[in-house]
Image: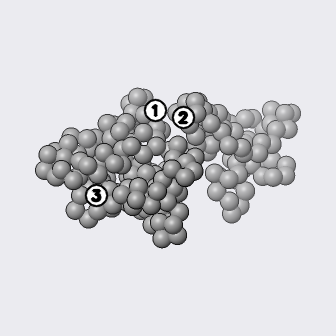
Amino acid sequence: MLVRPGLRPALWLFPRRPTKVTTSTAYVSLDASRVILILIPLPLLRKSRVYARLATITYGGEDVAPAQWEMDRTTLQQLAELRLKDAEALLDAGRWEVAYYLLGYSIECALKACVAKQFRLHDVPDRKLVNSFYTHRLDELLTISDVKSGMETRFRADANFEINWNTVRDWSETARYDVGVVTEAVAREMHDAVTNAVSGILPWLKTQW
């Protein structure tokens, strides 16, 4: 696959200008939940002379990752921490809506890290599990994460923990489109629900991932 040096695949899949190709090139085919790399034979590539520029791609109203670079449990754990730091910087800057949005993504990444524990090298994963992995719905991710029963046990021991989960699970990736909806109070409530040292959702998920 041709990836422009210095740029993430999320930004460019192919170079801006056509370049001489000496090997087969991977193109991306998308469906509702999977990213499939298809190798196009070099003669066909030369004949078609296709050089695609990456655009925003959606399927069924949800973003679909245009390229699958390496994504494993460790990366998801790191992303959960990084999105939290980004959110806290935005809270300090008074950017309530974007901070709220990234706090939700922090939990999404943490839940997906928990799901990733179920994948085993050389084992064929359950198709339903793989398809469900690509949702943004936090309640659905909890269901497939293998930590739901542990969370329910924690609910019975800590009422504030359950309240915090109810706050967090209302998050949706469509929050990125909100304008004038998320107030400072809402953003800070979300931050506390995510990070509270005693009853926060992220500290608990980090003990499970």
Q: Is residue 17 left or right of residue 153?
A: right
Other residues around mark 3 within 10 Å, as few (<14) / some (14–19) / many (≥20)? many
First along the sequence among labels 3 and 2: 2
Q: Count the labels in the image.
A: 3
Alpha carbon separation for disc pair 3 and 2? 32 Å
Residue to which mark 2 is pinned:
34
Q: Is residue 158 visible?
A: yes
Question: Residue at horizontal 72%, vertical 45%?
Answer: 54
First along the sequence among labels 3 and 1: 1
First along the sequence among labels 1 and 2: 2
Question: Residue at horizontal 62%, vertical 43%?
Answer: 66
Instruction: Specify the quadrant of the image occupied by residue 48.
Output: top right
Q: Is residue 79 visible?
A: no
Which of the pair 39/11 is nearer the observer? 11
- Please determine whether, in this image, residue 44 is positioned above or below residue 120: above
- Please determine whether, in this image, residue 88 is positioned above or below residue 62: below
